[in-house]
Amino acid sequence: MVSASGGAIGWGRAASSIVVCLVVGVAVVSGCTTRRPDVELTEVAATPSPTAAPSPSPTVAPPRSFTLIGSGDVLLHSGLWAQAAADAAAAGQPGMDFRPLFAAVRPVVAGADLAICHLETPVATPDGPFSSYPTFNVPPQVVSALADLGYDSCSTASNHSLDKGEPGVVRTLAALDAAGIQHAGTARHPGERASVTLLRGPHGVRVAHLSYTYSFNGLPLPRRKPWLANPLVVSTILTDARSARIVGADVVVVSLHFGTEYQHAPNSYQITVAKALLASPDVDLILGHHAHVVQPLEKIGDKWVAYGMGNQVSFQNQSGDTRDGIMPRFTFTEDTDGRFVVTRVEVVPLHMWLSGSPVRLYDVAAALSSPGTPSGIRSACAASLQRTRSVLGMRGAYEDGLILVGG
């Protein structure tokens, strides 16, 4: 995990020692605390040992392992920044504070070794002007809240990447840099586009993060600045993944903005792309977003794709489905060949409470297990869990070992 200030947090393992004691009759010496009182140490030392002490077994280090968590669209609408302003005012602070909105999932994000979010929209200057759908320009204060949660990287390639042109791209990446969050999917110059976003995990593990989108809502990439945002082209992704391996990535995670909005089942394009990418030895995991509803996970070979993680936060209120989200948590373990494979998949279900004040994001399992959860929120979370449970298994994920937290 990387701290909000961008510094690396190191991991270590305490060294262990072995004390070998020489045993003669009932006397124990050589560094141990008990000996027979009527036997002098010199006498014991002079007595030959009847058998040689066995050599200690060599210590075999356990395989390296780490956890990585992903999440869906951070999609700000005016209702969310109105809530952030109200939360700041309630604390006697000026401006906006998005931390209370996300507070319930902070333990989940901070508890993972690495965490990846999806910042769908460009950010404005701190004082605005702000705008919501269809052309977004959102408060940059949300970025500091994402850093406070513990996110290491955010994908920024989406159908809204170009909503505010090059200035929007520049502002967004500058805000992420200032918060100490790495990013992938958009770039300020060709060199940034060509570089690989490498996240440092525990035990020296290096994870590459790549990001691409199916569309820019009809806005063209500038002819002379095609590096501003990454379109979803399978051949390009495979080339980028190979480059990531060359510079030392142990694991390559690809964030994809794709799918049919408000449709739970992945479309044929999503399935085709996922199979093509996961067939490559250079791609290990796909994190999908854009549909604004939860889509299933699927194991393809020995790799996984989360087709759509729903919204993490939004003010979309068309139906209960758009208030649901998930945070899949993957445990990667190194095999005997030095390759990292997913050995455990857990999904944390989420729900956006929009039916009363204050607006909040809820960890569904935590809300249902807490006796202090208000009845209306409890009912909404229970219904959300039921919806999410039915969607996640659409493509055999439960049979392949997926665990739904609280489900």
Image (cartoon, helix red, strand yellow):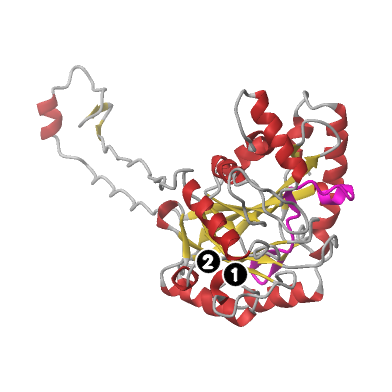
Residue at (18, 17) in percent of width and height: 38
The secondary structure type at the circle numbered 2 is loop
Q: Which residue is mark 1?
A: 229
Q: Position of residue 365 (x, y in %)?
A: 75, 38
User: Which region is colored magenta?
Assistant: 299-322
- Within 10 Å of the Cα at label 2, are there few (<14), some (14-19), or many (20+) other Cα atoms? many
Identify the residue at the far bottom of this view: 235
Residue type, label 2:
Ala
Q: Nearer the viewer, residue 356 or 129?
A: 129
Q: Position of residue 348 (x, y in %)?
A: 71, 46
Q: Is residue 342 visible?
A: no
Q: Position of residue 36 (x, y in %)?
A: 23, 21
Residue at (32, 42) in percent of width and height: 15
Residue at (64, 30) in percent of width and height: 88
Instruction: Tell me which numbered mark, 1 or 2, is placed earlier along the sequence.
Output: 2
Q: Nearer the viewer, residue 66 or 80?
A: 80
Q: Which residue is mark 2?
A: 187
